Amino acid sequence: MIVFTLRELQRAWRQANSAFDGCTNKTNAHRLLLFYAVETGLKAVILKRNSKQDSEGMFADTLHDLNKLLKDLYAGANLHLPKDIRLDELTHPISSKQRNAICGDLNQIWRYGAVARNPTDEELEAKLSAINEWIRGELS
């Protein structure tokens, strides 16, 4: 993993936030910006709490698991994303298969054009927005 400074993570959080907030009629492409804002924001909070100036030796086992980052921060369970995200079934001539994802896959769901059904994309956006507000308080 590339090492980033606390300043870079904070700037990435602010910029992704600003891009998301400036959008109207939000789509999953916009929600992807929110996802990355939350991810970089949580990592910035971890560095700040640990008085670290860069991410050296951090986050290698985290990937995009926002719940793991929230757990590491001892954030309340009310901020955690659902463990199971259901997508539309795949239908083929021979079989149907239910697709489930975890919160660490949310960026893939939105990046590749899928739609979350339970919880919905809008519900996931609201959850990410709540986490983002928590981050705002932590980074002020």
Image (cartoon, rainbow, N blue to C red):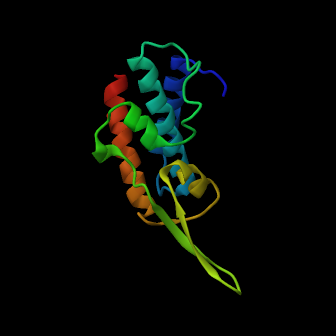
Q: Which residue is drawn at 46% across and 20% down?
A: 47
> Where residue 105 sits in the image (x, y, percent)?
56, 52
Relative side of 119 to 27, left or right:
left
Residue furthest to the bottom: 93
Relative placement, left or right, of 77 versus 85 is: left
Q: Residue at x 57, y 34 (%)?
A: 61
Q: Which of the image's four quarters has the N terminus?
A: top right
Image point (50%, 55%), residue name: 102
Image location (x, y in percent) of residue 65: 50, 43
Task: Point out residue 37 in the picture as x, y percentages from the top left corner.
Answer: 49, 37
Give above or below for 72 relative to 84: above
User: Which residue is farthest front?
Assistant: 61
Q: Furthest residue to the right?
A: 93
Dividing the image into 4 quarters, which one contains the C terminus? top left
Total label count?
0
Is 112 left or right of 26, judged from the image as shown?
right
Q: Which of 130 and 55 is in front in this view?
A: 55
Pick the residue in front: 54 or 129: 54
